[in-house]
Amino acid sequence: VRVPTSLEMHPHLTLHRHPMCAEIIEEFQKCHVDHPIKKFFGECTDLKIKLDRCFRQEKAVKRKANFEESMKFKERLQAYKKEMAEKENES
């Protein structure tokens, strides 16, 4: 586990956690390396905005997938409850 220092403006960006945004992450990290002083004066701001948008899109995709999965689980659970109720009524 990596703990951010007080000099960092954001948590460590890992490519494996954000596959949809990997290219932008790499560009952003390269910008910070290439411009160690200018980054504090907005040199990498456009990339940061692109990265934030990408993270939002990635989160929306994950949210949709989780919702669809939860709906399938809910349907299976309701079918199971109905089946159990029918078995109980037969007894």
Image (tube, rainbow, N blue to C red):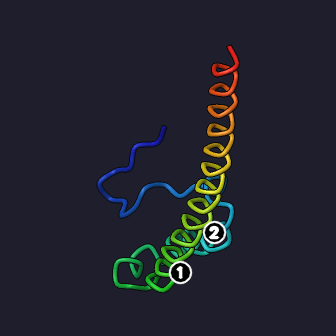
The residue drawn where x is 43% and y is 56% is 11
Mark 2 is on which residue type? Cys
Name the foreground residue: 78 vs 35: 78
Give the residue at mark 1: 50
Mark 1 is on which residue type? Lys
Mark sitting earlier along the chain (1/2): 2
Q: Quadrant of the C terminus?
A: top right
* Residue 67 locus on image (x, y percent): 58, 56
Q: Secondary structure at mark 2?
A: helix
The residue drawn where x is 60% and y is 53% is 66
- 9, above or below 46, in the image: above
Q: Are marks 1 and 2 in contact (CB under 8 Å)?
A: no
Q: Which quadrant of the figure has residue 45? A: bottom left
* Residue 58 locus on image (x, y percent): 59, 66
Name the foreground residue: 14 vs 18: 18
The residue drawn where x is 49% and y is 72% is 32
Task: Give how far apart the Cα atoms at labels 1 and 2 are.
Answer: 9 Å
* Residue 12 locus on image (x, y percent): 48, 55
* Residue 40 locus on image (x, y percent): 35, 77
**45 on left or right of 89:** left
**50 on left or right of 41:** right
Given the current orientation, which residue lies at the most extreme left position? 6
Q: Badge 2 local density, few (<14 within 10 Å), some, or many (20+)?
A: many
Given the current orientation, which residue lies at the most extreme top position? 91
The residue drawn where x is 48% and y is 37% is 1
Given the current orientation, which residue lies at the most extreme front position? 90
The circle drawn on residue 21 is: 2
Name the foreground residue: 10 vs 42: 10
